[in-house]
């Protein structure tokens, strides 16, 4: 995969994070923002061209290289600027891939409906709506991540794969674990459960494991295994997965509403197979709480199957009176991310079984977990992951960053130009650089965990984990040239 030329309009947090990741992969990046202080701050952090100018000006974009760019990413604070800039570039440079972050939910929903209704013409004869190839909505990305965490029992951040019973679960190891003090090469002597350790978090660092890696109490491991085996492995790690029958959702704003829609909607109406296994299970109690009277009324009208209350979720008297402290799970998804962290930890201290908190970014996620929150979903990082997935090319299907971004889990397709085509896993291993986890043979729908004798062919889909700084090189090795 050859390095790309990418123009980013908007030098806020998301723009800078994207630039850092892309620069680390040896891509050529140009960053544009019309705020002098913002661009000065970005210049001090990044080794790339940073221009202080209006990004929705074609002359400015041409000055920074849009004519030769592979992609344009618009992540300014203004939806209109992002959309107009993409439309402007599409009119003159239609071959440039255009991605826009759009926070206006109406824009996002109406565009999605129109694209679905006219899917055939948009893919063949028409340009994309507003000239945008991929429209990213932060609230939708965050809500999807939270629902996925709920579907997997809120045991930690989980990566699932379509049409597969396999997943990568993030599980903490306690001092009571049978794995405490055991090297990975000896771990098979402790259990018959089939699993593969994809990564290890130790002392604040995340790394790829080797056979000599020793698991210790306080570590967190990313484990590839079948969903049905998660409870057994959690028990081996010293913890327990409980069934989530009583759920409290704190926050009835846009993200909370999307979460409730996905968790409460009828399975037949779901367009995604990802959550069908969970939706078949009915909640014994699903409660929505918000201190805003208008939001609570709207939620009550929309979700008849839920109990909706207008109240302060930090009021201990209210929580005990309504029995919220006995619930299995609390999802804190208000617009106040700091409140979410504190509230999730507080609810667990009162007796709530598990908690999920929406936070602003990965560093705050680390803080939340240290406070005792089971799963922290970083809003900004969900957006970055989604954008990065679209930048990897047609052969790359999906990408997930691990913890604070040191590692990436990537699903890609083996092409005819791939250097691994026809080779066995045992012949291409590169310890410390990447680890191949799963393979789905061309023409099939089921993934399987790889072993040394797994052989790759064009059309196969593989899931691998790699160091972020080596990601582009590794993907070019597997996916070949496009």
Image (tube, grey):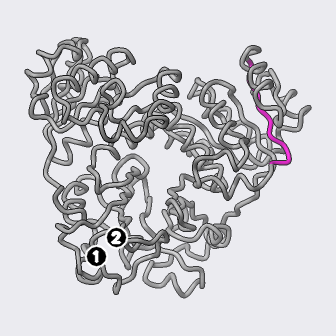
Chain part drawn in magenta: 283-291
Q: Give the residue at x 57% y 35%.
A: 358
Label pair 2/1, CB-CB below 8 angstroms: yes
Q: Is residue 126 left or right of residue 481?
A: right
Q: Is residue 284 magenta?
A: yes
Quadrant in the picture for residue 306: top right
Residue at the spot of label 2 = 460
Q: Is residue 440 magenta?
A: no
Residue 72 x/y as whole percent: 23, 31
Residue at the spot of label 1 = 457
Q: Give the residue at x 26% y 17%.
A: 38
- Which type of secondary structure does the marked residue at label 1 adopt? loop
Q: Is residue 176 above or below residue 124?
A: below
Pick whichever, 135 or 115, lies toward us: 115
Q: Quadrant of the N terminus?
A: bottom left
Pick whichever, 41 or 225, lies toward us: 225
């Amino acid at each position: 995969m050859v390095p790309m030329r990418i123009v980013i309009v908007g030098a806020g947090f998301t723009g800078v994070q994207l630039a850092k990741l892309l620069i680390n992969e040896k891509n050529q990046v140009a960053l544009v923002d019309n705020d002098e202080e913002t661009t000065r701050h970005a210049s001090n952090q990044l080794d790339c061209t940073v221009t202080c100018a209006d990004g929705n000006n074609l002359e400015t974009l041409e000055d920074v290289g849009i004519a030769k760019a592979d992609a344009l990413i618009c992540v300014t604070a203004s939806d209109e600027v992002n959309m107009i800039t993409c439309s402007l570039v599409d009119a003159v440079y239609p071959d440039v891939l255009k991605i826009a972050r759009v926070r206006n939910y109406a824009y996002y929903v109406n565009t999605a409906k129109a694209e679905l209704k006219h899917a055939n013409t948009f893919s063949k004869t028409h340009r994309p709506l507003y000239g945008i190839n991929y429209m990213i909505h932060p609230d939708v990305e965050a809500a999807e991540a939270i629902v996925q965490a709920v579907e997997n029992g809120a045991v930690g951040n989980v990566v699932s794969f379509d049409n597969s019973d396999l997943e990568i679960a993030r599980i903490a190891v306690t001092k009571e674990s049978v794995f405490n003090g055991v090297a990975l090469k000896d771990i098979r002597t402790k259990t018959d459960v089939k699993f593969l350790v994809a990564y290890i978090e130790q002392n604040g660092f995340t790394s790829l494991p080797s056979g000599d890696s020793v698991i210790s109490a306080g570590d967190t491991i990313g484990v590839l295994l079948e969903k049905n085996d998660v409870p057994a492995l959690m028990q081996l790690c010293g913890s327990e997965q409980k069934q989530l029958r009583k759920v409290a959702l704190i926050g009835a704003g846009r993200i909370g509403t999307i979460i409730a829609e996905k968790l409460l909607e009828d399975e037949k109406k779901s367009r995604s197979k990802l959550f069908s296994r969970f939706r078949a299970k009915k909640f014994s109690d699903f409660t929505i709480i918000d201190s805003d009277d208008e939001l609570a009324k709207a939620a009550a009208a929309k979700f008849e199957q839920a109990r909706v209350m207008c109240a302060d979720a930090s009021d201990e008297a209210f929580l005990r009176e309504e029995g919220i402290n006995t619930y299995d799970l609390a999802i804190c998804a208000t617009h106040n991310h700091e409140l979410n962290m504190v509230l999730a930890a507080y609810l667990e201290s009162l007796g709530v079984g598990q908690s999920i908190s929406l936070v602003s970014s990965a560093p705050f996620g680390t803080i939340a977990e240290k406070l005792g929150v089971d799963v922290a979903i970083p809003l900004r990082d969900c957006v970055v992951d989604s954008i990065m997935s679209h930048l990897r090319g047609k052969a790359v299907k999906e990408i997930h960053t691990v913890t604070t971004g040191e590692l990436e889990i990537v699903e890609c397709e083996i092409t005819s130009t791939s250097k691994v085509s026809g080779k066995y896993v045992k012949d291409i291993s590169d310890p410390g650089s990447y680890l191949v986890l799963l393979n789905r043979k061309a023409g099939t729908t089921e993934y399987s965990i790889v072993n040394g004798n797994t052989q790759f062919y064009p059309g196969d889909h593989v899931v691998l984990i790699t160091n972020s700084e080596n990601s582009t090189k590794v993907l070019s090795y597997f996916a070949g040239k496009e």
